[in-house]
Image (cartoon, rainbow, N blue to C red):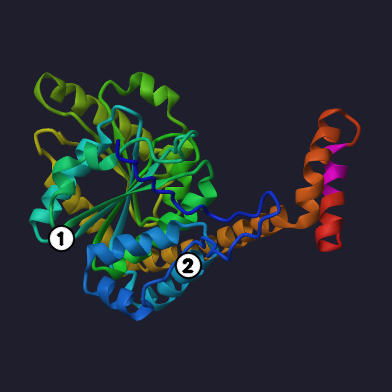
Amino acid sequence: MMEEHQHVRKGVMAAHDGMIAPPRKMFRKKKSVLPDLNVMVNGIVKGSVKELAKAITFIESNADDHYKYGQDLLQKLLPYTGNAIRIGITGVPGAGKSTFIESFGMRLCDAGHRVAVLTIDPSSSISGGSILGDKTRMEQLAKHPNAFIRPSPSGGTLGGVHRKTRETLALCEAAGFDVILIETVGVGQSEFIVRSMVDFFMLLALTGAGDELQGMKKGIMEMVDAVVVNKADGTNKSLAEKTKREYNQILHFLQPATKGWESKAYTCSALKNEGIDTIWTMMKEFRDVTEKSGVLIERRRYQTKEWLHTLIMEKLKNHFYRHPYVKEQIGQLEQDAMNGDIPPSQAAEQLFKQVYGTE
């Protein structure tokens, strides 16, 4: 019987059992290399959607190096911004915002305009990602070469949306998009934020406005430059006309949202592409009127000032909560306040005194 050959694999030395481990290279995360700033700027100015998407990712990132890169990029691109008409669109769920935006956007894209759609989505509390999935809701528009769709997940903070959406809007203008549409989810404070960053603000409404008008906040109605009653087709058409008249009666007694412009109600059918041209003509008239009167320039100047103060508030908040003393003490002070051992005002004063030396 032949003796079997045995192969013994050499062992690996380790630092246990008194052995000395051989020197080994430790795994190190590869440092991210940021794209050349000038190359990125040139790509965006030439209308590259690929470079634009990359730039927005840097703007939205919370990483320090990405944030700084995004701000440097924005600084270089500011001279190329401000040439688009900025349109905000809100409406109750079911009003057909996505259908309207797709129909409206396709009409403009086919006419040679470049349209960017920015949507403020609620974020999933589990994944942090946006819920609405806009490219699946506007499939036809998403495929058009003249269109760009980008959701802005809120991440639970509307202040973050304000900064990121404003900066994304500026990047889209620098990339040559001449019509910017910003869609809100139609709930709460998001309408006020969008109003503060657009030229023209529109409410998309449904027919049968009786109950809807009862629940409509006066504040929302005072912000809009037009109300558009959607789904005005088939047997619903006469009801849509009636709803339009009801809205016009309300708008007549309210303070106009824009000086020198009378807010009115209109009807359309986004599904059948009816009334879309009328709405676009009305928006162009709004742009002409406000440009000639100087109202548009003044509105944008005020919005820029508001943007500055929003950034200051965001920066102060981040600086405060990142302070070592606050991170160390906030949990205990929260418990003390909830247990009634200390008034919340006193807890806040204690934190401010340590961080800023003032009460």
The residue nearer to you, when weighing 339 against 58, is 58
Secondary structure, magenta segment, majority class: helix
Q: Percent from the top left, x then y, of residue 214?
A: 42, 22
Q: Percent from the top left, x then y, of residue 29?
A: 49, 61
Corner quadrant of residue 175? bottom left
Reply above or below: 40 against 184: below
Q: Which residue is drawn at 8% across and 54% down?
A: 110
Which disc number belongs to residue 31? 2
Which disc number belongs to residue 136? none
Q: Give the range drawn in magenta.
A: 343-349
Corner quadrant of residue 253? top left
Which callout, 2 or 1, points at the residue further toward the start of the chain?
Answer: 2
Question: Marks 2 and 1, how far apart in space?
Answer: 40 Å
| Quadrant the N terminus occupies | top left
Q: Is residue 346 magenta?
A: yes
Q: Percent from the top left, x then y, of residue 358?
A: 86, 60
| Quadrant the C terminus occupies | bottom right
**What residue does disc 1 label?**
113
Reply above or below: 46 against 2: below
Q: Percent from the top left, x then y, of residue 115?
A: 21, 56
The secondary structure type at the circle numbered 2 is loop
Q: Mark 2 belongs to which amino acid?
A: Lys
Q: How crowded is mark 2: few (under 14 residues within 10 Å), some or many (20 or more)?
A: few
The answer to whether residue 266 shows anywhere in this view is: no
Query: In the picture provided, is 113 more to the left or to the right than 296?
Result: left
Corner quadrant of residue 354? bottom right
Q: Residues within 10 Å of mark 1 (few under 14, many from 20)?
A: some
Q: Which residue is drawn at 28% across and 20% down?
A: 208
